[in-house]
Image: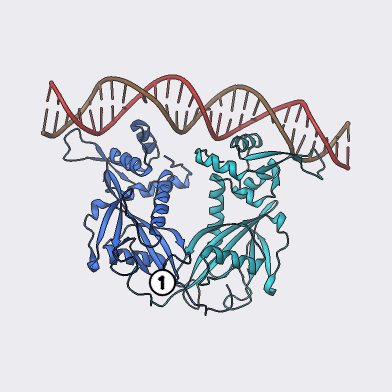
Chain colours: A blue, B cyan, C red, D brown
Amino acid sequence: MTSTYKYPRPALTVDCVVFGLDEPELKVLLIRRDLEPFRGKWALPGGFVHLDESLEDAAKRELREETGLEKVFLEQLYTYGNVERDPRERVVTVAYYALVRLSEHRVVASTDARDAAWFGVHDVPRLAFDHDRILKAAYQRLQNKLRYEPVGFELLPKKFTLRQLQRLYEIILDRSLDKRNFRKKILGMEVLEELDEVEADVAHRAARLYRFNPKRYREMVKRGVNFEI
Amino acid sequence: MTSTYKYPRPALTVDCVVFGLDEPELKVLLIRRDLEPFRGKWALPGGFVHLDESLEDAAKRELREETGLEKVFLEQLYTYGNVERDPRERVVTVAYYALVRLSEHRVVASTDARDAAWFGVHDVPRLAFDHDRILKAAYQRLQNKLRYEPVGFELLPKKFTLRQLQRLYEIILDRSLDKRNFRKKILGMEVLEELDEVEADVAHRAARLYRFNPKRYREMVKRGVNFEI
DNA sequence: TCAAAAGTGTTGAGCGTACACCCATGC
DNA sequence: GCATGGGTGTACGCTCAACACTTTTGA
């Protein structure tokens, strides 16, 4: 921290990698740019940080303004500050990633007359700026996170079956899991509440519904329980 | 990414949490502030990001200017952007943490006529700004990192004994480890090179020296070897 | 009655953990 | 010869991974 605040300043933005689960695929929400540079290209939703809001607030605001999403899981990912990441001038961006329940946010308002669309995470076009790199980092972070913390519930409806949960793990981690072992493991963590309800409208035996219990989870964390899958 | 770059901008700084191992203790390098606010208080070394340097370059430059340190392990930690973290005006800081071999950097030049000093990580005074919080986060990150990646070598001399390494783990993780198990585990990872040298100047049987082999490490990572301690 | 998925237990292998003694060296 | 740490092996328990069949339900 030096003596003056008068240096010329980089611009500061936030960008969000928004993941949603649309079985059988993990999707990312992108915005089509209507301005240069990269006009017409797809990019991560994001924008400038205002002086009177925290970084996380800025990310939430941009998410709301550009995609209509609110109250989603949001976590800081990394800050990107290479000198030439924006062709016009110096822009540093703080990247966040978000997890949304598509079941509860089906329609994403293309507010602002802007295009917004979900892309399969393995089927994303070349993005503007260094957003490809950010997306890749976010996906890796999600994979790691899921492996050690029960964060996947953020992508499922509040009530879900064990099969849905297993599919989520398989989709994100990109490998298949043994059904019996998975159930043993996940139930053994004691963070799922078994409900007296079963799924509806299926053409076969209906599966039991469960709900994640965050309070129980916090207790387990305190006790040092391991949530590795 | 919206239409204009003309928003008023937060100031952007980098701050570094510098760890060094000074057996039997882990230490942090702090700078005494000679300006308001928090004049006379201890703080993390850091300063403004210039327009023509990346964030990591800025962190390296500040480290060099304020502490004389060069060529150290450096990794981005987190970006702090609460509105009131600097009493004067809006300042966002990208925090880094660094690991240095005290054996090779014994003397830290207090360049700039500034006080610089090492503090035991459990014995740090109240710091300026939100630097307490940053330090805490960096320490946790180091603990986690060490648990899953062989990063501790950055704190030891290039040639070290297994005992030194074990002590390092014990100091950072803050628990004691079984000697035989530790040796089995760490040697089993096959990233240490056994040297034909032993430590000198000890009043008992001299221990063999080892060296970390980063190339072998990268191979092991590719093979999916687990480095959890 | 058929199709589809739900739900359930056991076994073997490998890994982590706990634990104690002899050895080499310098003084 | 003694004090100090260096260096080594084994046994047990637990967890992980592999694996297949019966049950339930709706169409």
Please state if A189 lies on the left or on the right of B25 as rendered: left
Relative image position of residue B182 (x, y in whole percent): 62, 37
Name the image quarter holding the C terminus of chain B: top right
Residue B1 visible in this rendered orientation of the protein: yes
Q: Position of residue A109 (x, y in %)?
A: 22, 62
Name the residue tied to disc 1: A88
| Residue A75 in which image quadrant | bottom left
Badge 1 element: loop
Front residue of this view, candidates A81 and A211: A81
Question: Callout 1: residue from which chain?
Answer: A
**Residue at position x 21%, y 57% from top?**
A107
- How many circles with numbers are drawn on the protein? 1
Judge the density around disc 1: few (<14), some (14-19), many (≥20) Cα neighbours within 10 Å. few
Q: Residue at x 61, y 38 (%)?
A: B186
- Location of residue C18 with respect to B2 vertically, above or below: above
| Residue at the (31%, 63%) spot, across then down | A63
Residue A151 % position (x, y): 37, 48
Residue B164 located left or right of residue B185? right
Look at the image and tell me whether residue B44 can be seen: no
Q: Position of residue B14 (x, y in %)?
A: 54, 67
Q: Is residue A138 left or right of residue B164?
A: left
Q: Quadrant of residue A163?
A: top left
Q: Residue at x 70, y 51 (%)?
A: B23
Which three-letter amino acid code belongs to the residue tagged 1?
Arg
- Which quarter of the rendering shows the N terminus of chain B? bottom left
